[in-house]
Amino acid sequence: MYYATDYISPLGRVKLTADGEALIGLWLEGQKYFGGKVKEEFVENRSLPVLENAKDWLDRYFAGKKPEISELPLAPMGSAFQQGVWELLCEIPYGQVTTYGEIAKKMAARMGKSSMSGQAVGGAVGHNPISIIIPCHRVVGANGSLTGYAGGIKKKVKLLDHEGVDLQKFFIPKEGTAL
C-alpha cells in the first residue's frame, strides 16, 4: 500500500508519497511522469511520520535552510541505472550545478565503461520520482542551457534562484521537452 499527502510549496501543490517507511515520490503539480512507476492508488494519510518528516524537510528548504538529503529515508522506484544516476544527483551540493555530461562520465566510471550517453543520463534525471529532495534541478546542459526539468523550466529557475545559483551564465532554450 502506498500513502500520499499534499504539501503547498512556493512552487505550487506538491504530492508526497511513501510506502509507509520511506519516501517514494515527490511530484510537482503538472509534472511529467507524475506517479512514476506506482500503478496502485495512493491512500491519503496526512499524519504518516515519513510524510510529516518530508514536509518538515521542505519547510526548512524553502525557508532557506540546507537540510541534508540523508535526513529522509528515500526509496525511489527505478532501474539499477536510474538508481545510480539518482545517487549521483544526491552528491550535487546545494547551490551548485553540474552537467548531464559530467554525470554520464561518473556513471560510466561506476559501470566500468569508457563513456556513456548524456541522453541516457538525461532520461534517468527526467524520471527522478523525488524532485527537489533528489536535486535533479541542479543539472544543466554543457552549453549553459537550463533544459531538462520535468516540473517545468520556470520551476527549475525558481529552485536554482532560491539556492543562490548565479543564473546569468545560463539560458532558457527556445524549444525542447522541458518547457
Image (tube, helix red, strand yellow):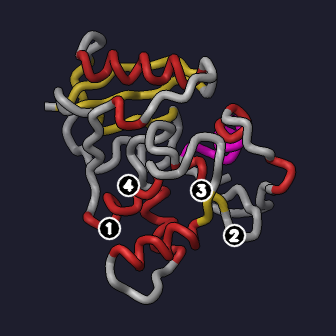
Disc 3 residue type? Val
Disc 1 residue type? Phe
Badge 1 marks a residue whose secondary structure is helix
Magenta part of the chain: 151-158
- Residue on which disc 4 sits: 87
- Nearer the observer: mark 4 or 1; the answer is 4
- Nearer the observer: mark 3 or 4; the answer is 4
Mark 3 and 4 residues: CB-CB less than 8 Å, in contact? no
Badge 4 marks a residue whose secondary structure is helix
- Residue on which disc 3 sits: 139
Mark 2 and 3 residues: CB-CB less than 8 Å, in contact? no
Q: CA distance from mark 2 to mark 3?
A: 9 Å
Residue at image position (40%, 61%) is 85
Hey, which quadrant is residue 142 in on the image? bottom right
- Numbered badge on residue 142: 2
Where is residue 179? Give x, y as percent.
Answer: 68, 52
**165, above or below 146, in the image:** above
- Residue on which disc 1 sits: 81
Badge 3 marks a residue whose secondary structure is strand
Q: CA distance from mark 2 to mark 4?
A: 20 Å
Instruction: Work out whether mark 2 precedes mark 1 in sequence or the reverse, and give the earlier one.
Output: 1
